[in-house]
Amino acid sequence: MARTTREFNIYVKHTLDVLRARDVDVEPLLEKYDIDESALDGDEHLISQADYSQLLDEVIRKYTVPGLGLLDGRGVNLLDHGLLGYAMFASASLRKAIERHSKYQDVIGAVLHTALFIEGEEAHLRVVSIARPDMVDTEQKLHYELERLFSQWAEIGPAIGHSRHWFSRVELNYKAPPYRAMYSEVLGDPVLFEREHNQLSFPADLLDQPLSFANEAAAQLCEQQCAALLGELKRTDGIEGEVRRILANQPGKYPGIIEVARALAMGERTLRRRLADEDTTYKQVVLEFRMELAASYLRGNAMSIQEIAYVTGYADPSNFHRTFNKHQGLTPNAYRRLHQAGQ
């Protein structure tokens, strides 16, 4: 199924920068995949999973850039990952940041799933499954994703008072490539190949190390929104599910049908027809998504009703009140009181 998240824009931007730094002419790629670089930082023109996967496949096959994944991951910071990134960034400790990542990694469209393991005085952040096999359908692409993932985790080092070489050991389950020295340069030593697991190991006492920008109240607010988004992602399959995934990755911003059709690599008429085949319309999908998200937030206490109106795309709270009342048969205040009374 076609998927799109803002992360694809971020990854493409970094890849283009890496290629340019190695004197690669990227103009043919921009033209072939109809990429407007000036729009990569925004949310209106999201690159689809299909285009991202094809572009990455072409880059790996056509250009010889040793350690491309290591280079691509370097410089990608937590805040590049939207709500989940903010939740991790503001976490009270490294442990909380890792736990939140493990719980909500699907919100950012993770290709590889990771989990935390603690064995005595050592902790391991281990790759436990491939979440999206279609994104790693060649050995080269799998190695690229592992390199990029581990390189991104190295960026957390300064937030816990360490350098980017904060791992005590890095293990990978494949043979060392000719550019193995780059692994040590980016991830630190030792880097061990042909091991049982793909994992990053570090002293377990680092888990309770406070993060530099800890604000647990803000982190919990972002986590609540991640939970609501994850619930929406899991609700629906088919083309409606794909539209919902796009909406979930642009919280508070609701693109028009033309932008969504483009992100799904299809025409507007095709998207309308496919939604009609599922007995719905684009307008209905957006409304249902916004109201279900609002209801999820109202069942908690982290946000005021005005804040909920804003994060669900209503600049005017009175419009939010009217729409929610019409959709649910209750005002936002009444809905909140009803559900809190039952808790």
Image (spheres, rainbow, N blue to C red):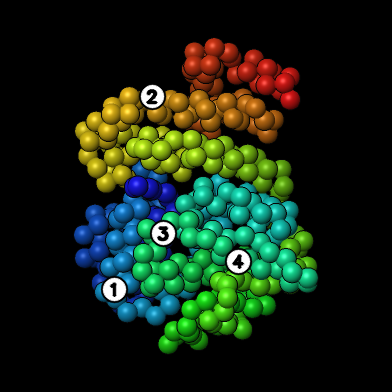
Q: Disc 1 marks which residue?
A: 61
Side of 51 where 28 appears, left or right: left
Side of 172 where 260 appears, left or right: left
Q: Amino acid at mark 3?
A: Pro
Q: Amino acid at mark 1?
A: Arg
Q: Amino acid at mark 2?
A: Gln
Of the pair 10 and 104, the residue shown nearer to us: 104
Secondary structure type for disc 3 = helix
Nearer mark to the viewer, of 1 and 3: 3
What number is the disc on residue 252? none
Could you give the CA–CA distance between mark 4 and mark 2, rounded to whole angstroms?
Answer: 40 Å
Question: Does residue 171 lie above or below 267 as drawn?
Answer: below
Could you give the CA–CA distance between mark 2 and mark 1, rounded to whole angstroms?
Answer: 42 Å
Of the pair 267 and 18, the residue shown nearer to us: 267
Could you give the CA–CA distance between mark 2 and mark 3, rounded to whole angstroms?
Answer: 31 Å
**Marks 2 and 1 close (CB-CB < 8 Å):** no
Q: Disc 4 marks which residue?
A: 126
Side of 110 where 58 appears, left or right: left
Residue at position x 64%, y 51% from top? 100
Secondary structure type for disc 1 = helix
Q: Amino acid at mark 4?
A: Arg
What number is the disc on residue 133? 3
- The quadrant in which residue 121 appears is bottom right
Q: Disc 2 marks which residue?
A: 284
